[in-house]
Amino acid sequence: MSVKVIIFLLFTALMAIFTYQNQILINVRFLHWEITDVPLAMILLSGLIFGFSLTFFMQLPRIIKLKKELKRVVIELKRSEEIVAAHDEDVNSEGISMGSDYKGGFFSE
């Protein structure tokens, strides 16, 4: 089993225990609305889900922007690799062209 699956199952078991132990019924009032006899665990879990959803939707524009930028960089990288492959010149590890008449290192004959 994967580590993620084990962690998910652990959190699911903890959530079930939490729900079982918090079966207290409460009344919820918000502005002019009132809901009676709601389990405490439902209120806490719905608040948790609402918080995660709000965080996700607040970050969604940035995620979309970063994905577009990543695609642009990947396309640019592929183009630069094609340009480098098209040239016959030897290029050392720093990306400096040594010229077509270069025969080797300092000590080569």
Image (spheres, grey):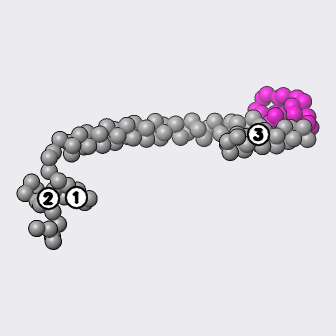
Q: Quadrant of residue 58?
A: top right
Name which residue lies at 70% across and 40% down: 1
Residue 66, position in %: x, y?
A: 43, 41
Which numbered marker is on residue 21? none
Q: Amino acid at mark 2?
A: Met
Residue 40, position in %: x, y?
A: 86, 37
Name which residue lies at 34% across and 42% down: 73
Q: Which residue is mark 3?
A: 9
Quarter of the picture holding the C terminus:
bottom left
Which numbered marker is on residue 92? 1
Q: Secondary structure at mark 2?
A: loop
Q: Locate residue 11 relative to residue 69 in the image: left or right.
A: right
Query: Which segment is the magenta one?
Result: 22-43
Q: Quadrant of residue 65?
A: top left
Q: Locate residue 57 relative to residue 18 in the image: left or right.
A: left
Of 21 and 31, which appears nearest the observer?
21
Q: Earlier in the sequence, mark 1 or mark 3?
A: 3
Q: Secondary structure at mark 3?
A: helix
Q: Is residue 34 magenta?
A: yes
Name which residue lies at 70% across and 36% down: 49
Which numbered marker is on residue 98? 2
Q: Amino acid at mark 1?
A: Asn
The residues bearing labels 3 and 2 have C-alpha atoms spaced at a distance of 59 Å
Q: Locate residue 35 relative to residue 69 in the image: left or right.
A: right
Q: Is residue 65 among the parts visible in the rendering?
A: no
Check whether the beta carbons of the residues at disc 1 and disc 2 lie within 8 A of each other.
yes
Residue 10, position in %: x, y?
A: 78, 43
Q: Earlier in the sequence, mark 1 or mark 2?
A: 1
Q: In the displayed structure, would residue 105 be above or below residue 66?
A: below
